[in-house]
Image: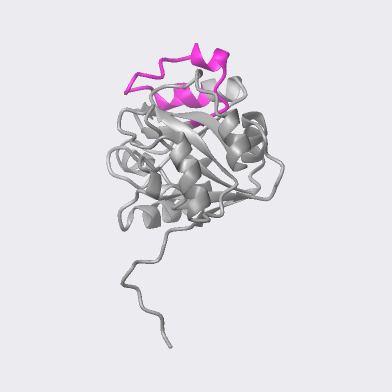
Amino acid sequence: MILDLHTHSIKSDDGRAKVENYCKWIRKKEIPLDGFVLTEHRQYDSESDYRSLEDEYNLLILKASEVETDYGHVLVFGVNEDLLHSFDFANIRLPIQTVLNAARENGAFAAPCHPGRKRVGLFSHYELSGPISDVHTVEVFNGGSIPGEDELSVKQAAIHGYKGFGGSDSHVVSRIGYCATAFESDSITTVEGLVGELQSGSFEPISLRPEPKNATTEP
């Protein structure tokens, strides 16, 4: 089962994509995704209901969050009422340890995203302040990365023994599915199921970036 674990809709302040347009694009371009996770910035969207879109386009649509910490940005899967009361999702300087502890205690799963990026990536903070012992999984393939960022993420994840996953970090429709995560399980239907599979470590990051238009093929 292939899921894009990192996407943004117009619910995020910098997102320009409507969720239905993501669905239409996936089907139009025949992108091999079984679904995607909306990870809106500094919030959890508890109001939106995408079940009708799931049925119409035969896609799994789950919701999560992207929060900002003193060690960079972190994706939080499995957000629930208890977790929402554990810290302020809008705070842009959350202690990463607070986020990791709260996620673990409330049955969620927290993992740093685009860790190879300057300032907002985990590994740039490791250079200054040292590693965090409770980190175990990071996003190593990010569809919004510039050259060198994913390579650094892969290298540092290997050094620290971290499991890696992928997500497009799409903010516009045409970017969805650039990177994703392939799970061994083909039966994820809920965010709780997703959390369980992430905890199991039975997945791999994949890149689905389109070939450059000027790319040539050897005869």
Q: Is residue 142 above or below residue 112?
A: below
31 relative position to 150: left or right: right
Give the image quarter of residue 13.
Answer: top left
Is residue 133 among what the camera can see?
no
The number of numbered discs placed on residues in the rendered structure image is 0
Q: Is 81 colored magenta in this rendering?
A: yes
Residue at 50 percent across and 22 percent down: it is: 48
Give the image quarter of residue 81.
Answer: top right
* Location of residue 9 in the rendering, given as x and y in whole percent from the top left corner: 40, 33
Q: Which residues are magenta?
A: 76-101
Closest to the observer, 212 or 143: 212
Residue at 47 percent across and 36 percent down: it is: 20
* Location of residue 87 in the rendering, given as x and y in whole percent from the top left corner: 44, 15
* Applied colour scheme: one colour
Give the image quarter of residue 136.
Answer: top right
* Location of residue 55 in the rendering, given as x and y in whole percent from the top left corner: 63, 36
Q: Is 111 colored magenta in this rendering?
A: no
Q: Is residue 106 above or below residue 152?
A: above
Name the residue furthest bottom: 219
109 relative position to 207: left or right: right
* Location of residue 219 in the rendering, given as x and y in whole percent from the top left corner: 43, 88
Residue at 64 percent across and 49 percent down: it is: 1
Is residue 11 among what the camera can see?
yes
